[in-house]
Amino acid sequence: MSGTSENLSIQHNDPSFPSVWEELQWRGLVHVSTDEVELQRVLSGEPITFYCGFDPTAPSLHLGNLVQLLVMRRLQLAGHKPLGLVGGSTGLIGDPRPSAERTLNTKDVVADWVNRLRGQVENYLSFEGDNAARMVNNLDWTASLSAIDFLRDVGKHYRVGTMLKKDAVSARLNSEAGISYTEFSYQILQGYDFLELYRTYGCTLQTGGSDQWGNLTSGTDLIHRVERGSAHAIGTPLITNSDGTKFGKSEGNAIWLDPEMTSPYAFYQFWLNTDDGDVIPRLKVFSFLSREEIERLESVVAEQPFKREAQRVLADEVTSLVHGRAATDAAIAAAQALFGQGDLESLDPRTLEAALRELPNTTTPPTTTLAQLLVDTGLSPSLSAARRSIAEGGVYLDNVKVQSETQTLAETVPDAAMAVLRRGKKTLAGVFIE
RNA sequence: GGCGAGUUACCCAAGCGGCCAAAGGGAUCUGACUGUAAAUCAGACUGCAUCGCAUUCGGGGGUUCGAAUCCCUCACUCGCCA
């Protein structure tokens, strides 16, 4: 499992900010919100109960969810009481994506994913003390709700005109994809969650991504209408890369928090490769470093970008936050061994083997061709792609350029027990020869 | 329910009987340059393979020597009318 719990005790907000609200602002974590003045007042006062939901759309949370988890943790560190919600029911419906209708997953799959997500969320919050976090599942209060009750008690408070104006809905109505009644109804379900938590726990704040804004206000409006109560919402910005590409992807794959889906080594590398222009905003969002420390790193990026100090700190901070100190040290050691200045032969075999274990790796007989090896290690998606890469001169075995797609391991490294396979400058895999 | 438009490779989008494995852009990958950056330039980008072969343009069926392109049908989407 993750080693996150070891981090909880050392995390703290930056005391130089008058309140957590100012700190969230400075870190760029507030994109939209309900009444700012009121929110600032509420967050500076007595502890409030707040919630953030996670829908089971995959077996693991990803970096976008990590933003939410860290917002929750910062609010908790300021004394407020978190409710971690997993979407056992909303996950069965699916919120409208801008592009196209979701494919519904089976109830078994959703239930399994809900359990996995709950375990992950629990790693980032403290369940001890006066403001201990609590976990809830919206299936608990929707499973028994009949369609008739739902329409009478909840649906009656919603105007279709308002629902149609929500960005998520109107975007879909204006697209070729259209929208199903199922996804159209999603905002009502999420609004009802907030109402339920307001009634049961006195929850008065929901946080979430700004793409969820329509769903967040669905809840605050409902609470106001039904209970004549005051509730708030904070929408975090969508994290974007300065070059316009999508944040949180590596080679087209999402970066997951589950170490089985994205290895700590790959996770560390992802952060290490952050653009200069993005690294400071990332530190603000994803690390607990103080403003003073981040501003120091900012000047280092400006004056000595080649040192990549901010990237190293960022990679270290986030990897240890998610995977723990030991896994982070192993990832760093592997990177040093493989990207270090010394040649591979100077590494002692134990260090090399440990490094290769951190990479995608395979065990194979010496007669395997190098093209096949690219496929077996996952470095290339097909034999054709592997051949192409070799023809392009982009494949190396133990740092020696591979000349022919048909050469075998035995022909290339006759006496080796293991080898480093590389595609391009920094995509690596380990090969163990049996 | 009626009429019209549409469904092309990861995304957007051309093609409208052979020269189409399918223009162009984006994303992605490789190389040069670098700091395991960015920007820029060059190349690649369905699969298997020695010219070549196989499968692809929503699904199915047909016409034709030959179809992404024509016809029929089914599904889905959008728009207008009811």
Image (tube, coloured by chain):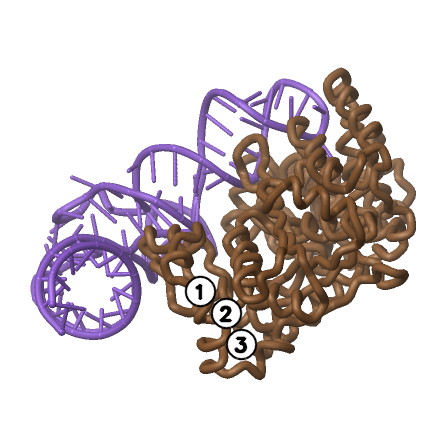
Chain colours: A brown, B purple
Determine the image quadrant of residue A366. bottom right
Looking at the picture, tell me which residue is in the foreground, A169 or A322. Answer: A169
Q: Secondary structure at mark 1?
A: loop
| Residue drawn at point x = 64 percent, y = 77 percent | A140
Looking at the picture, tell me which residue is in the foreground, A12 or A357. Answer: A12
Crowd band around label 1 with a 10 angstrom C-alpha radius: few (<14), some (14–19), many (20+): some
Placement of the N terminus of chain A among the 4 image quadrants: bottom right
Placement of the C terminus of chain A among the 4 image quadrants: bottom right
Q: Which residue matches tag 2? A: A93
Where does residue A141 sit, x and y in percent of width and height?
62, 77
Where does residue B55 sit, x and y in percent of width and height?
33, 62
Determine the image quadrant of residue A54. bottom right
Comes first in the chain, label 2 or label 1: 2
| Residue drawn at point x = 74 percent, y = 59 percent | A49
Q: Which amino acid, mark 2?
A: Ile
Crowd band around label 3 with a 10 angstrom C-alpha radius: few (<14), some (14–19), many (20+): few
Give the foreground label among 2 and 1: 1
Q: Which amino acid, mark 3?
A: Thr
Q: Which residue matches tag 1? A: A158
Q: Is residue A303 above or below residue A356?
A: above
Q: Is residue A314 visible?
A: yes
